[in-house]
Image (tube, helix red, strand yellow):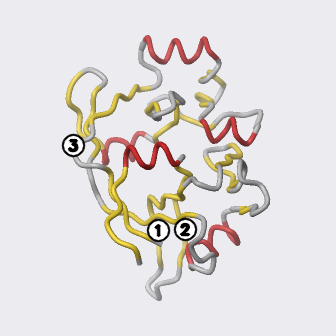
């Protein structure tokens, strides 16, 4: 495991689903975002790698960010608002805070990785670099290559220190390098 934080002062563009936006409209025309009965399906880089027929689920008031490769990905409204500072228009500053991360080559015996495998459906396929990681996330099945990083957004533990739940996602290596600084290795 290692500790990372978003790069300080990084300015990003984000778009609120359900509001008029040229960028979201273009992504919808391209098929990267689809309107559905329960909100939206967002076809992120990780959804496309998994060859899943469904995109990641996003609600009417969730946000869409665009990764370094031009792929959209959803952020739940509450998480986004806690972790971004509004500047103007569609520009936001990412708030930098320390979180845990993990990558291939590190011990799979870490309790967080064991929890993801046992309780969250994480599959690590050592024989398939392109789909090294696969897991059910955001109402879809996502996959990421072996150089991607697992980011732990939230780890809930009980009073005895046992993991109860984890919010996580895969982060493409290009996206990770552009957006995170490594603070320390554990």
Q: CA distance from mark 2 to mark 3?
A: 30 Å
Q: Are marks 2 and 1 in contact (CB under 8 Å)?
A: yes
Position of residue 116 relative to residue 53, above or below, is below
Q: Are marks 2 and 3 in contact (CB under 8 Å)?
A: no
Position of residue 91 relative to residue 168, above or below, is above
Residue highlighted by disc 3:
9
| Numbered label attached to residue 55 | none
Q: Residue at x 31, y 47 (%)?
A: 83
Viewer-side label of 2, 3:
3
Residue 90 is situated, as x and y percent measured from the top left of the image, at 31, 24
Q: Nearer the viewer, residue 66 or 120?
A: 66
Q: Nearer the viewer, residue 167 or 146?
A: 146
Q: Which numbered disc flags the more N-terminal residue, 3 or 1?
A: 3
Numbered disc 1: secondary structure: strand
Q: Residue at x 68, y 48 (%)?
A: 143
Q: Which numbered disc flags the more N-terminal residue, 2 or 1?
A: 1
Q: Are marks 3 and 1 in contact (CB under 8 Å)?
A: no
Mark 3: few/some/many CA within 10 Å (<14, 14-19, 20+): few
In this view, the residue farthest toward the bottom is 160
Residue highlighted by disc 1:
155
| Numbered label attached to residue 165 | 2
Residue 184 is situated, as x and y percent measured from the top left of the image, at 34, 71
Position of residue 55 relative to residue 104, above or below, is above
Quadrant, the C terminus? bottom left
Q: Residue at x 42, y 66 (%)?
A: 100
Question: Is 153 left, or right, of 125 in this rendering?
Answer: left
Q: Which numbered disc flags the more N-terminal residue, 2 or 3?
A: 3
Q: Residue at x 46, y 84 (%)?
A: 161
Residue 106: quarter of image: bottom right
């Amino acid at each position: 495991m290692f500790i990372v934080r978003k790069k300080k002062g990084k300015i990003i563009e984000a778009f609120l689903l359900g509001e008029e936006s040229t960028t979201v409209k273009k992504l919808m025309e391209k098929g990267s975002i689809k309107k559905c009965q329960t909100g939206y399906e967002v076809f992120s880089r990780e959804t496309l790698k998994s060859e899943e027929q469904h995109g990641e689920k996003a609600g009417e008031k969730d946000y869409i960010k665009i990764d370094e490769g031009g792929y959209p990905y959803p952020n739940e409204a509450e998480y986004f608002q806690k972790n971004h500072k509004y500047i103007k228009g569609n520009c936001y500053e990412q708030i930098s805070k320390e979180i845990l991360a993990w990558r291939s080559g590190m011990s799979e015996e870490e309790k967080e990785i064991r929890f993801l495998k046992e309780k969250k459906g994480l599959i690590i396929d050592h024989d398939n670099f392109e789909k090294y990681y696969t897991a059910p996330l955001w109402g879809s099945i996502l996959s990421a290559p072996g150089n991607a990083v697992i980011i732990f957004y939230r780890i809930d533990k009980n009073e005895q220190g046992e993991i109860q739940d984890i919010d996580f996602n895969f982060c493409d290596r290009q996206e990770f390098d552009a957006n995170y600084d490594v603070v320390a290795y554990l």
